[in-house]
Amino acid sequence: MKKNILLLVLFFFLFQQCDSKPVIPAEEEKPTENVIPDDSEEPGDTDESDDTGDAEEPEVPGVWASASEINARLGRGINIGNTYEAEQSWQSPFDPADLKRIADLGFTHVRLPIRWERGDRSLATSPYTITPAFLQVIQAAVDEALEQKLHIILNMHHHDALMANPTAEKARFLSQWEQIADHFREYPDSLLFEILNEPHDQLIPTLWNGYLSEALQVIRTTNPKRCVLIGTAEWGGVGGLPSLQIPDDPQLILTLHYYNPHTFTHQGASWSEGSDAWLGTQWHDTQFERQAVEQDFKAALRLSVEKQLPIHIGEFGAYSRADLDSRVRWTRFLARWFEQQGFSWAYWEWNSGFGIYNPQSGQYEERLVNALTSDPMTEPYEPDYVNLYSSNFANGQSDGWTLTNNDASAASTMAVANNKLTVTVTKPGTVDWHIQLIKAGMSIEKGKTYRVAFNASSPDSDERRITVDVSRNSDPWTGYGSQSVTIDKSHSAYNLLFTSAHTDSQARILFSLGNAGNTRVVMSDIKLMEVQY
């Protein structure tokens, strides 16, 4: 009888185990790394009411949306900057309550920059182990974001050793992604990975294309369907697009950073050399300032359509030393314009030099919050223009424009006909300044704003990069304003707007045409104007 009872008990136990759901391991105690304790709930508080309105629940594991669907869900986001990507000397503490604040403002995702290579977080030598304690710190942030119904992007940020010596650091880079991907393999599709922030320095475009592809393969071993964001070399901006090779993978989102015009967004920034001279630069939201943005994104929009590749703006923001009116105008236009293009975006950043929230006072910069979340697109401002120079290419004359080939790897010729100047490149050189079209003798004054307007085309290419500058005409060639644009086969209008930090009666307008293949560039109607607000 005892034997029968024992068999019945054993049978009942096995039946219960087979019919039960998978057991979730007990959560480990999460160590803190500059984490502000979340005391928003009293012990024993069991109120589970949902006060987040109609926010969409994150997808459950096993349900994987397409990249375009996930990009639409990302919507508006913000970077938790100066926190986990910082060195210990300038790291801000992470406050889990910030994620609820962010969700309550109407944002739908956060980007969490992370410096994984820090010595207190991972080994610099094989096997390159990321400490379990730090993985738990990041997991706690991810869990809280998902709890607040926010999507979250984890990236690899400030991997300085990799930038300086890619070959020596490649194994560590791939090993760390193997560990990160494996740790979060069971998470839902509302968690995204971004392979590397702003590749630059020795991690040149050709190397980056290979490293990007290999890292993606490593991630796909454990996360075959997770959305992965890929960026461009040369600091992650639109200028790096021509060199980027897109892997054949349907779950990719292209991420781009945008800080143009740099002299406006980074004025007075201590880490940006010469930026004190830019103080006072304003952004007025004129039609031509807007057109400069549209010009910058022409290639990105074309690529997005051709490759069916969604676009995420991973960073954009204007530093707090710019005047607030200009910051609001710039931020509002970009946020609304990005949305019109179908881009998701993440503002840089939450609570530091670019931020919208002051953690000391607990107050928001309401005008910036509104610019990001609720202000509608406005009509552009219309200033007055005073013409200072207009090109004259009549009767085959060059009007004082000269063409220089500045390296043995560059060769080009110039011809003028039909009121247009054509540069024919036969050897492109290796950098853009190896071929330059120059007109000197321009007078500019410190503190005044100028517009260079011109028409341009390339009969041989629908994606031809050129750069227009106004600068000093002798060593040290000080730059006063610069803009890179992508021209195509249609002869179209382009603009450079800048506020000069210098007075120069012999400044030059120059077009840098090198390092873009053996293609022709056609120019006409080049003008320099003073902008009067």
Image: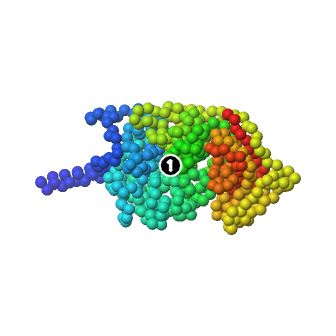
Describe the colour scheme in one phrase.
Answer: rainbow
Task: Pick the residue in front: 336 or 147.
Answer: 336
Residue 379, given in percent of the width and then of the height, sits at 66, 33
275 displayed left or right of 364: right
x, y percent for residue 462: 70, 55
Quadrant in which the C terminus appears: top right
Name the residue nearer the viewer: 274 or 433: 274
Residue count near mark 1 (Cα–Cα under 10 Å), binned few <14, some 14–19, many ≥20 = few
Residue 299 x %, y %? 64, 52
* Residue that numbered label 1 is attached to: 271
Q: Name which residue lies at 19% across and 51% down.
A: 9
Q: Work out whether residue 190 can be spotted.
A: no
Furthest-right residue in this view: 395
The quadrant holding residue 48 is top left
Based on the displayed image, in which of its 4 quarters is residue 120 positioned? bottom left
Q: Nearer the viewer, residue 470 or 10?
A: 470
Quadrant assignment, res 409:
bottom right
Q: Is residue 352 visible?
A: yes
Q: Work out which quarter of the rendered image holds the N terminus and state it.
A: bottom left
Q: Residue at x 58, y 36 (%)?
A: 326
Local SS, label 1: loop
Q: How many marks?
A: 1
Give the amino acid type for the residue marked by disc 1 in the picture: Trp
Q: Is residue 401 above or below residue 210?
A: above
Please indicate whether residue 196 sits to the left or right of residue 377 in the image. left
Q: Is residue 168 toward the left or the right of residue 467 in the image?
A: left
Residue 400 position, x and y percent, is 79, 53
Q: Residue at x 52, y 35 (%)?
A: 368
In this rendered view, identify the residue nearer to me: 383 or 154.
383
